[in-house]
Amino acid sequence: MISENSYRRVAKIISPHSLDGKLKIHVISDIAERFEIGGTLYLKVKDIYKKFIISNFIPVKNRIALLKLEGIDDRSAAETFGKTEIFIDRPTADSIRSNLDEDSFFYQDLIGCTVLHEKKIFGTVIDILEGGSVDILIIECIIYDKNNKDNNKNKIKDNKKQILIPFVDSMVDTSNIKEKVIEISPVEGLIDI
């Protein structure tokens, strides 16, 4: 069985687009070659990665595009995929890594990063939510007991909390991503824990 770690997310289906089975998608990859005609993509359907060949790709606006895949030939077939995520396999993703600029990285590289806030460990990036104008980091953080003045780790509350942070340069510093560390500087009032 191929693990989820063997794939890299590059887009997500928004909706069916036309009678011929085109899909309206939100693209998260900055590498246009991911969507070349004849290329391979995988749709994640109930934890199974189903392979498809790209027959057409039309950029529309910002990160929105129209995608036509072989075997999805009408609107009914397109509707069965709902808001499915779209992936490439890891070897394909890694083959392009050497072409990235020094300051560039894959979104997938953010997953699992330790998050610092005010120079202290705040949590871990567990996912990225594709937004309309800006993507959102989902950070899981541990909630400490506020009554414990010395923050003794033995007195951690029994729960974790997910915090959403807009993935914008002014709030997220990725300069240490190669060490799997990012630092956040959210605007006042955005996080309250």
Image (cartoon, helix red, strand yellow):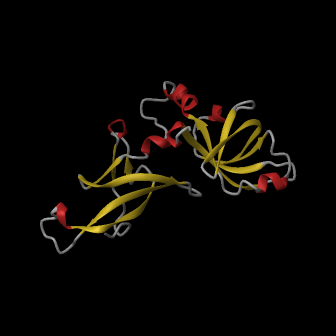
Task: Answer with left or right where residue 76 lies relative to residue 100.
Answer: right
Residue furthest left as drawn: 150
Q: Is residue 134 above or below residue 152?
A: above
Task: Answer with left or right where residue 8 lies relative to residue 183.
Answer: right
Task: Answer with left or right where residue 151 lies relative to residue 61.
Answer: left
Q: Residue at x 16, y 64 (%)?
A: 151
Task: Give the percent coordinates (x, y) of residue 54.
Answer: 74, 36
Task: Give the percent coordinates (x, y) of residue 112.
Answer: 39, 46
Q: Residue at x 40, y 52 (%)?
A: 125
Task: Give the percent coordinates (x, y) of residue 184.
Answer: 34, 53
Task: Answer with left or right where residue 182 lies relative to residue 71.
Answer: left
Task: Give the percent coordinates (x, y) of residue 188.
Answer: 34, 66
Q: Residue at x 42, y 34 (%)?
A: 103
Residue 125 visible in this rendered orientation of the protein: yes
- In the rendered image, the quadrant that contains the N terminus is top right
Hey, which quadrant is residue 161 in on the image? bottom left
Residue 62 visible in this rendered orientation of the protein: no
How many dots with numbers? 0
- In the rendered image, the quadrant that contains the C terminus is bottom left
Residue furthest front as drawn: 1
Q: Residue at x 80, y 39 (%)?
A: 70
Please name whichever residue, 29 or 124, is drawn nearer the observer in this view of the structure. Answer: 124
Hey, which quadrant is residue 76 in on the image? bottom right
Hey, which quadrant is residue 185 in on the image? bottom left
